[in-house]
Every structure is written in structure tokens, then in C-alpha cells.
């Protein structure tokens, strides 16, 4: 694989994923882990992503004129990495019916439960919400920022942990850094709502999906084929 421009290809995919194509963020982030020693399979998968991009080159992010408020979605794939069993976090922030920020990344430490993986993902999206709220207000877009900001999750245990300050045997080991979220909830900066997995936009940022679910997430992200 030394003669293949793997690093250059992955760099291009990451650039595109960060700019306008959240639908390839998970693939680009996963493939980037093998830049030091890529195998033939990694190269073939990267080329498959290119073929997908060619077939969907007419896709683009659409926004509406409606005064849709800032809201956030997050998800995790518990122990999804078969090598080190670390989980993958994904989050997307929506405004005017389109994504304005999204991220797919492997968590820094191993989560011992789905609740812990989701709670770590919640901590990440909470920091992004705080940053974007300040940015929008600084730019004069206060009307798009509600207080509290709505955050959506498909894990009831993570929601309860964000509201309940009492540790128990399943959660007492969780890094205190993650409890930044609880402070935001207590101060009514954010409010976390349960959302069924079938309606979770951030699913596309944490794992490979079936064609049907992938296309549904694209519709929910408002990745339109009607861009001129």
C-alpha cells in the first residue's frame, strides 16, 4: 500500500465531511485511524466512499427561512471499535432545518455501559451547544437561541443521570468532567428530551447503517438533491 495515496485521499474525505457532507463523517473518521499502516481493505473501502460521493455529488445542505431554533442531537455506539472496545460519539446541531455543526469521533476512554457512552457523548455535545450559543448571540442571532436549548437523546439512563446528582454503583466511576452537563441542566441552560432511535439524526455519525436508515437520516439532515 506504500504506492497508494491513502493519506491524501483520507485528508480529502475529512475535508469534505467537515464542510458539507456529514453523511460521510463516520466513514472518514474511521478510515483516518489507519493512516499509519493502511491495508488493502481500507483502500478499497475508501474508494467505495468515493463512488458514493460521485453518485451523490448533487447533494447539499438546505436551510429554510423559518425561524427554527438551535437544537442538538447526540448518540453513541457502545464499544463499537473491535480492537480497543472504545465507543464512538456523534452529535449534530440543527438550525433553520439544516445542520450547522456535526462531529464523529472515538471516545478517549473505554465506557463500561451504554449509559456511560451516551453520557460521555452528552458531555461533548453540551460543550458544543455552549460554544454555538455564544457565537450566535455574538453575531446578532439571539432570536434563534432559546433558553433552555433542546437536546435530544435516545438513552433514558443518560437523561436520568444528567438530572440526578446521586451516584450509584453503576455510575460512581464516571469521570467528573462529564458532569459539566449536569450543571447546565441545573442552571436550565439545556433541557434533554428522549427521542426514539428511529428518529435519531446523530445515528449516521456513530455507525454504519442499512441503506434504508442511511437515506432516512439524510432526509432528516435536510441533505437535498435540489441544490443549484
Image: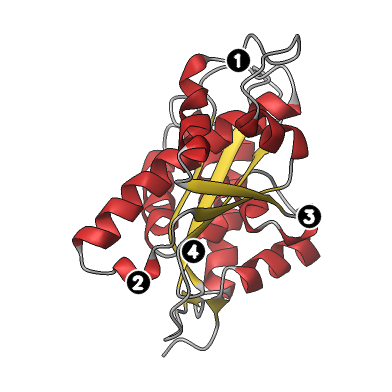
Q: Residue at x 43, y 62 (%)?
A: 146
As drawn, 61 above or below 76 = below
According to the picture, the residue beneath numbered tag 2 turns out to be 143
Sequence-first disc among 2 and 3: 2
Whole-angstrom CA distance, mark 3 to mark 1, is 25 Å
In the image, 82 versus 112, the foreground residue is 112
How crowded is the residue under tag 3: few (<14 C-alpha within 10 Å), some, or many (20+)? few
Sequence-first disc among 3 and 1: 1
How crowded is the residue under tag 4: few (<14 C-alpha within 10 Å), some, or many (20+)? many
Sequence-first disc among 4 and 2: 4
In the image, 97 versus 204, the foreground residue is 97
Question: Is 93 placed left or right of 40 in the picture?
Answer: left
Say whether marks 3 and 1 touch (CB < 8 Å): no
Q: Position of residue 114 (x, y in %)?
A: 74, 28
According to the picture, the residue beneath numbered tag 4 turns out to be 94
Q: Residue at x 47, y 79 (%)?
A: 62
As drawn, 59 above or below 52 = below
> Disc 3 on helix, strand or loop?
loop
According to the picture, the residue beneath numbered tag 1 turns out to be 174
Q: Residue at x 50, y 16 (%)?
A: 176
Give the numbered dot on residue 196.
Answer: 3
> Disc 4 on helix, strand or loop?
strand
Whole-angstrom CA distance, mark 2 to mark 1, is 36 Å
Say whether marks 2 and 3 touch (CB < 8 Å): no
Question: Is 203 placed left or right of 198 in the picture?
Answer: left
In the image, 89 versus 151, the foreground residue is 151
Whole-angstrom CA distance, mark 3 to mark 4, is 18 Å
Say whether marks 4 and 1 touch (CB < 8 Å): no
Q: Position of residue 55 (x, y in %)?
A: 59, 74
Residue 77 visible to an observer of this rendering: no
Q: Position of residue 83 (x, y in %)?
A: 67, 19
Amino acid at each position: 500500500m506504500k504506492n497508494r495515496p491513502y493519506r491524501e485521499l483520507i485528508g480529502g474525505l475529512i475535508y469534505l465531511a467537515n464542510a458539507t457532507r456529514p453523511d460521510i463523517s463516520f466513514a472518514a473518521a474511521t478510515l483516518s485511524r489507519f493512516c499509519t499502516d493502511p491495508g488493502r481493505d481500507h483502500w478499497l473501502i475508501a474508494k467505495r466512499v468515493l463512488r458514493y460521493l460521485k453518485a451523490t455529488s448533487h447533494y447539499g445542505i438546505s436551510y429554510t427561512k423559518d425561524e427554527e431554533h438551535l437544537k442538538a442531537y447526540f448518540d453513541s455506539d457502545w464499544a463499537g471499535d473491535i480492537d480497543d472496545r472504545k465507543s464512538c460519539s456523534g452529535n449534530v446541531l440543527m438550525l433553520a432545518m439544516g445542520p450547522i455543526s456535526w462531529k464523529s469521533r472515538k471516545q478517549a476512554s473505554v465506557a463500561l455501559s451504554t449509559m456511560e457512552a451516551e453520557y460521555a457523548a452528552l458531555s461533548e455535545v453540551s460543550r458544543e451547544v455552549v460554544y454555538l450559543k455564544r457565537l450566535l448571540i455574538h453575531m446578532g442571532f439571539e432570536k434563534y437561541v432559546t433558553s433552555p436549548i433542546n437536546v435530544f437523546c435516545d438513552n433514558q439512563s443518560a437523561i436520568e443521570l444528567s438530572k440526578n446528582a446521586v451516584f450509584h454503583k453503576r455510575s460512581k466511576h464516571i469521570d467528573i468532567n462529564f458532569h459539566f452537563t449536569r450543571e447546565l441542566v441545573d442552571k436550565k441552560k439545556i433541557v434533554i428530551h428522549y427521542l426514539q432511535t428511529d428518529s435519531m439524526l446523530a445515528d449516521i455519525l456513530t455507525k454504519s447503517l442499512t441503506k434504508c436508515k442511511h437515506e432516512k437520516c439524510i432526509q432528516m439532515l435536510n441533505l437535498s438533491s435540489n441544490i443549484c
